[in-house]
Image (cartoon, grey):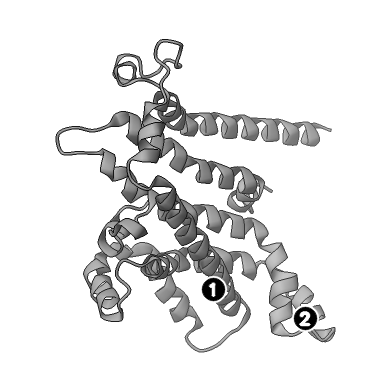
Amino acid sequence: MSQARHSITRSVAAHAILITYTLIALFPVFVIVINSFKARKAIFRSPLELPNAETFSLIGYETALKQGDFLLYFQNSLIVTVVSLALVLLFGAMAAFALAEYRFRGNLLMGLYLALGIMIPIRLGTVAILQLMVATGLVNTLTALILVYTAQGLPLAIFILSEFMRGISDDLKNAGRIDGLSEYRIFARLVLPLVRPAMATVAVFTMIPIWNDLWFPLILAPAEHTKTITLGSQVFIGQFVTNWNAVLAALSLAILPVLVLYLIFSRQLIRGITAGAVK
């Protein structure tokens, strides 16, 4: 009885801590959103107050939608993020399954080599990447961004997913082989459903850096028709004058996909992060 009560107490405490950290993390988002609906003077005069009849203004959203092709920027970011995320999850899961399931010469070295991608930032190779994209004619294309972000996300995806796949029972996979399932069906029908929390975790941690990145869009795809939402928002930031209404409105619209993804994968994300932490 005391053990069950202790378990309930730990669960309540864990949820309380999670809610607290969530509120702390969302506070900057809250400040950005409420200020996006204010006039310029009200942003600096009372940044923490909610907009009222005197301070409410939609000038930021009107400017963001009229100046520049904001909808195109949003579409470009969505295409790059979704395609890159799909490729990272697909190839990352396949590579992780091979490393976790099969024993071959160089298995450990291959895992260490892939893990180097987590420790060494891909931006160190910006010059070489730019030269490669120029040579292949991929500059100012969304394909260039998709390739770079896929390469950037694979090391972390393989590292996380391989650890989860090593914990799957060998008896389950051997039973599938006895029943005549091919390795592809074992991977798709038996392994992937069991690592769904880990897939959700990888998806969230991969999407956020891609969606918010400014470096590679500025270097590889700065053309007007390939700008992402983060790069497109920079048109409102000048050397001497910054249109804060438009900047805050653009950032508020850019936050929406991240929040939607978090709401969709929140339960799987928490399970993936805490797996094995609480017994």
In this rendering, the answer to whether 189 lies above or below 23 is below
Depth check: give the residue in front, 5 or 260. Answer: 260
- Distance between the alpha carbons at the discs numbered 1 and 2: 23 Å
- Answer yes or no: is residue 169 visible: no
Q: Hey, which quadrant is residue 152 in on the image?
A: bottom left
Q: Residues within 10 Å of mark 1 (few under 14, many from 20)?
A: some
What's under tag 2, amino acid-wise? Asn
Question: Where residue 174 sits in the image (x, y, percent)?
Answer: 77, 81
Q: Extreme bottom residue here? A: 105
Per the image, label 2 sits on a secondary structure element best described as: helix
Front tag of 1 and 2? 1
Residue positioned 63% across, 35% down in the render: 14
Q: Which residue carries the number 1 mark?
A: 91
Depth check: give the residue in front, 157 or 165. Answer: 157
Residue 150 relative to residue 86: left or right: left
Q: Which residue carries the number 2 mark?
A: 174
In this rendering, the answer to whether 99 lies above or below 144 is below
Residue 65 relative to residue 45: left or right: right
In this rendering, the answer to whether 249 lies above or below 162 is above
Question: Where residue 84 sits in the image (x, y, percent)?
Answer: 48, 64
Q: Hey, which quadrant is residue 77 in on the image?
A: bottom left
Per the image, label 1 sits on a secondary structure element best described as: helix
